Structures are given as structure tokens and as C-alpha cells.
Image (tube, rainbow, N blue to C red):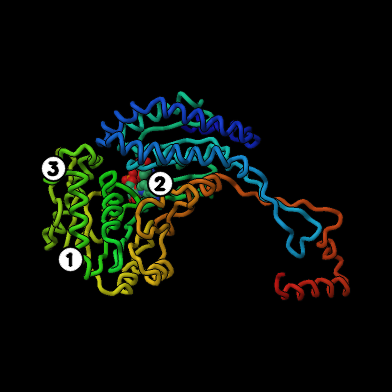
Amino acid sequence: MAAVFARQQETAIRWRESTAAERIDRIKRLREALLDNRDNFYAAFAADYRKSPSEVEASEFLPVLEEMRHVLGRLKRWMKPHKLWPTTTMLGTSAWVQCQPRGRVLIVAPWNYPLSLCLGPLVSALAAGNTAIIKPSEMTPAVSGLMARIIAKVFPENEVALFQGSTPTSTALLALPFDHIFFTGSPAVGKVVMTAAAQHLTSVTLELGGRSPTIVDESANLTLAAETLMWGKFINNGQTCVAPDHVYVHTSVKPAFIDECKKVLKARYGETPGQQKASQDLTRIVNGRHTQRVAALLSDALARGAVAVAGGEVDEAQCYVAPTLLDQVPAGADILSTEIFGPLLPILSYSDLDQVIAEINAGPKPLALYFWSRKQAHIDKVLTRTSSGGACINHCVAQFAHGNLPFGGVNNSGIGNAHGVYGFKAFSHERAVLRSSPLMLIKLFFPPYTLNRYKLIRQVVDMLRLPMI
Ligand SMILES: NC(=O)c1ccc[n+]([C@@H]2O[C@H](COP(=O)([O-])OP(=O)(O)OC[C@H]3O[C@@H](n4cnc5c(N)ncnc54)[C@H](O)[C@@H]3O)[C@@H](O)[C@H]2O)c1
């Protein structure tokens, strides 16, 4: 891989001059190859974790195709130098921001949305004019293998290369002096990536995880809350970075909310546990190890007195855990202190919104925060008093799909943003360019510092106390 990395250098330097048309052509070739392989992807996703074609379309193809469309329509504009007015002392100069490709970039991706989280960032990287090396997850071998074949067909290795493998492959790649690393995965591995990047002072975008809290207040439209929350929680069987982890429900509406959620689950996946298990719409847990991890969270909660008001069935051999709603989960249960990443939803009661906000603020800053309410004062309070990568009001997970919104975390849930122009900028160096003229004001500040010159500089500095017009 070091040899491929070395060969990408010549391309990366040449691509500094690449035009919008050339970059668009690369993205279009990738798009055609993806669409030519639609059925192969259905088969690969089915083999890896029985993801249904509808979810492959909605949660893998759709975000990538949408990203491509967004980029193709706007790239020319994004690439144009962004001209800026001179500030007071810079009168007589012109200035602009030139977005340059960073150069050679590394994209390391997780297993939960293997296509979307490898190729979405790749679209941004190509739009910004970079070469790329991709390291998908080892946990979805069928999808990763198919992507490797497609990438090798569309791009020579000195442009885009994909290396399959687990931690040793990542470690070897992370030792190389990339110009940018775009990592999606857990906060724990995010720290490993940032430490490795620090050796070369490589810039990073870290798209991480953590627990995303959710609140349903007494004014919420409970039908809407149940419909959207059951979708965001159980799509990909809960294996979603922005999936709601636990939900605080106002005591006065909790029984009605649980009833609504149960109705939605039955309508979507089947009336009985047997029908739900047979549903083709429920993705499986990615492997035995993760099934055991999720099953252990469930049995710990049940052993401590939690009640499964829906679901609760586990078949480890088939990597199956039913969509499960847990009531009366006691403080101290493991499920309340770790990212669940599976189909378990603890439903907690609250009567004081300030207390919920205090609990959220006591933990690491989440990737997402969701609030169902019709009270504007409550919405304002939650949005101003908390911090999270993103937030939705009366919806969940959908913020990921909005191409004009930045997508990213904050501190423990991530650094930097992806998607649309934010993704383009993540993979660009925003170079500041100043062009001077003989009339530049700053000339008056050059030495020798005579008394008059000193007085003039001082007057200009004093003038800066005046308000901007
Ligand atoms: N913010 C987002 O956009 C986003 C999206 C999806 C998943 N996630 C997060 O990803 C996590 C789940 O995915 P995962 O289990 O694949 O994450 P992970 O951090 O275990 O692995 C991510 C990638 O890093 C590699 N890796 C693992 N250990 C490594 C190490 N020690 N050194 C170098 N590389 C290593 C893996 O091979 C994989 O390619 C969750 O925390 C989830 O919230 C975040």
C-alpha cells in the first residue's frame, strides 16, 4: 500500500489543476458503475447481514446518489475563488479564498452503512480534486469485496485504491503521511486515528458515535413521534450512528406513547414474535459477536428489573434480536451507559424537562439529539441549553439526508463535517490569497518608524474603535 500511496503523489499534484468537468466525469463514472451493480449489491448486503433491497436503496444508494447529484449541480460554483472585500487596513488590495485539493486522502469506514459511508465521502473527496485510498470495514466482506472490484474497474490505483483488511491494514495506512484522513467509526478508534494523524500533523475529519438522547414531551403529536422514532430506531436494526439510544417520555403521555409504538411495530413487522422474526424488512445484526453484545445488554437490563413491553426475543444463531421496547429500566443498567447499536429502546419517564437537560449535559456531547414537542418554548429551551452534532425536532435520523445541512459530531461525537459543500470543504484546503497593488494603504506602515509614522499608525489603530458601518 505504501507503493500505491507513493504513486498517488504525482496524480495528486497534477489534479491540483483539474477542472470541474474532469471531476464531474470521475463522479459520473463511479455512479454508472454503482448502478450497473445494483443487483450485485442486493446480493452482497443480503449475504453480509440480510439487509432488504428497499433498505439498500433507501439507506445506501439514496444518500450516495443524492450526494452525487448535489455535487454535480454545484461543483463549478464551489470551485470558483471566493472574493472578499478588503478590511480597513487592507484597502488597496484584493483577496479571495482558493479551495485547493488537500492532495492524497484516506477514508476509513465502519460496517453499518458500508456503501454509503465509503462512497459518500469519496464523492466529496473527488469533488474537491483529491486522490483517495479507502479502507472499508472487515465486518461486511461481501459488500467490501464488491466495492473493491468496482473501484478497481473505475479508477487506476494511482487515482483511487481500496484496501480490504482489519486493524493491521488500518494501522499500516495510518502510518502514511496523508494530507487528510476522513474517519467514520467509534470514538475509541477515533482517538487512535487522531493520535496517528498527529505524527504527520495530518488534518482529520472524525465522524464518530456515542449515545443519542431523545425526548417526547407532553405536547408531542404521539402518532407522529411513534411513526418517526420507530423508523429511526429500527432501520438497519438499530445499527445506525444517529439512531436514538434512549427516549425520555413525559410521565403523563408515556402509556399512550408506548401503545402507539407497539401499534407501529406490529403494523410494520408483524403481529406476533414469529411473524416479526420472519419479516424480510428487519436487517440482521452484523455478526455473532455483536449479537452477543446486544443480547447481553438486554439480559442485564431484564435481570435488573426492566420490562420488555415489546420484543425481547433473541436467536443468537441467526443474529436476531427482535425490535424491543424496554420500560422501567433502572439507573445503573449497562444499556443506559453505552452506545446500544442494536434494536433495543429503553423508554424512561420524566416530569421535569430541566432535569432531562441536566442529565444530557452531564454526559459527552452526543452526535444527535431528538425532541418531539409542539411547545415552541420547550423547543427553544432544549436547543439552546444542550449541545450535539445535529438535532431534529419532531423527527429523527433525517438530518443525515439533508444535503444542505452539515453532518458531523461535536467533541466526543466527532470533529468536522461531511455532506454537500461541507464535505467539499472538508477535503479542500481553503487557501487565503491576497493580491496587492501599488496603492495599498499598509505601505504607510512600513519602517523607518519616524515620529510622524508612529502617530499615523496610532491614529489608524485608534480609528479601529469606531463601529463598522
Ligand atoms: N458519525 C457517523 O457518521 C457514523 C456513522 C456510522 C457509524 N459511526 C460509529 O461507528 C461505530 C460503529 O462502527 P465500527 O464498529 O465499524 O467502528 P470501529 O471504530 O470499530 O471501526 C471503524 C473502522 O476502523 C477500523 N479500525 C478498528 N479498530 C481499529 C484500530 N485499532 N486502529 C485502526 N483502525 C481500526 C475498522 O477496521 C473500520 O474500518 C459506532 O460508534 C457508530 O456510532 C459513526
Dot 3 amino acid type: Asp
In this figure, which residue is indicated by the disc labeled 2?
A: 184
Q: Please, what secondary structure does the residue beneath circle 3 have?
A: strand
Q: CA distance from mark 2 to mark 1?
A: 32 Å
In this figure, which residue is indicated by the disc labeled 1?
A: 330
Given residues 324 and 286, the one toward you in this image is 324
Closer to the N terminus: mark 3 or mark 1? Answer: 3
Label pair 2/1, CB-CB below 8 angstroms? no
Query: Is the residue at mark 2 in contact range of ligand 1, meaning its CB lies under 8 Å from it?
Result: yes
Given residues 64 and 208, the one toward you in this image is 64
Choose top left, top right, bottom left or bottom right for residue 331.
Answer: bottom left
**Could you tell whether 324 is left or right of 210 in the image?**
left
**Could you tell whether 204 is left or right of 229 in the image?**
right
Q: Which mark is residue 315?
A: 3
Dot 2 amino acid type: Thr
**Could you tell whether 151 is left or right of 128 in the image?**
left
Q: Which residue is painted at 82% across and 65% down in the image?
A: 445
**Above or below 27: residue 239:** below
Which class describes the residues within 10 Å of circle 3: few (<14), some (14-19), or many (20+)?
A: few
Q: Which mark is residue 348?
A: none
Dot 1 amino acid type: Pro
Q: Please, what secondary structure does the residue beneath circle 2 have?
A: strand
Q: Which residue is painted at 40% across and 29% down in the image?
A: 148
Given residues 109 and 402, the one toward you in this image is 402
Camera-nearest label, 2 or 1: 1
Report the number of discs: 3
Q: Position of residue 441 (x, y in %)?
A: 82, 62
Label pair 2/3, CB-CB below 8 angstroms? no
Q: CA distance from mark 2 to mark 3?
A: 29 Å
Q: Which residue is painted at 88% across and 73% down in the image?
A: 452
Q: Position of residue 343 (x, y in %)?
A: 23, 49
Closer to the N terminus: mark 2 or mark 3? Answer: 2
